[in-house]
Amino acid sequence: MREAIGNAFIVNLLLVFLVVVAALLIGSVSYSKAFKVKNRIIYTIEKYGGWDITTSGSSGYNIVQAEIETSLKDIGYHLSLATVFLLGGNCPSRAGGTIVYGKDASTTYHYCVYEFNNEKGHYYGVTTFMHFDIPLIGNYLEFPIYGETKTLYDVPTHFNH
């Protein structure tokens, strides 16, 4: 009987260890994806020199947002912000920054872009989110990942292909 109790303890300890390792792996993959998405958004904003860059013409569209959404589709960052709003999520406010993307439920992907002005120019902050959907608990967990662009100067408003 003594060995049976000892074996049950060892099995329980092994199960707890496996759950902890699985949680660390899932967290690592989710962090890696959110970090990659944040860097891709920052790279695209810096590439065009701003957020509100539209194609020339009367039916101009935001090419920065279009390129970011194409990249996010390729990466697999597919969470709709409308789902997060229904669950109570929102873009956190940043001191000194105005939200230029992510402030309403009509956006496609769950990320936030902030614009900041300083004495040398302006720069953008980007918040992406690590998401965990745990079926047993039923809660939707998200953790923000934040990064900033370098200071941008002489931002064009139109871009010709």
Image: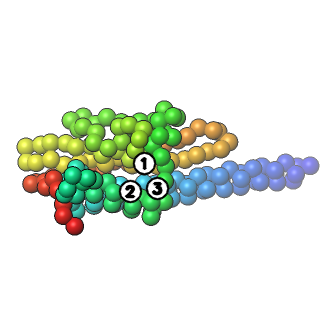
Q: CA distance from mark 3 to mark 2?
A: 9 Å
The numbered dot on residue 79 is none
- Badge 3 element: loop
* Residue type at the position of mark 2: Glu
Image point 23% across, 38% down: which residue?
97
Tag 1: amino acid: Thr
In percent of the image, x 49 and y 49: which residue is there?
79
Which residue is the extreme one toward the front?
Answer: 58
In this rendering, which labeled residue sits more in front, label 3 or label 2? 2
Q: Please identify the quarter of the rendering in which residue 95 is found.
A: top left
Q: Residues within 10 Å of mark 1 (few under 14, many from 20)?
A: some
- Residue 126 vs residue 10: left or right? left
Give the left or right position of residue 89, taking residue 18 as reference: left
Q: Earlier in the sequence, mark 1 or mark 2?
A: 2
Q: Are marks 1 and 2 in contact (CB under 8 Å)?
A: yes
- Which mark is drawn over residue 77? 3
- Front in this rendered view, residue 84 or 23: 84
- The residue where tag 1 is placed is 108
As displayed, is residue 106 above or below residue 53?
Answer: above
Q: Residues within 10 Å of mark 3 (few under 14, many from 20)?
A: some
3 and 2 marks in contact (CB < 8 Å): no
In this view of the protein, can residue 143 be seen by the observer? Answer: no
Residue ID for mark 2? 69
- Going by the image, does 85 lie left or right of 64? right
Quadrant for the C terminus in the image: bottom left
Residue at (12%, 43%) from the top-left corner? 118
Instruction: Looking at the image, tell me whether mark 1 or mark 3 is earlier in sequence order.
Output: 3
Q: Is residue 70 above or below residue 82?
A: below
The structure residue drawn at horizontal position 41% and vertical position 41%, both measured from the top left corner, is: 106
What's the residue type where badge 3 is placed? Tyr
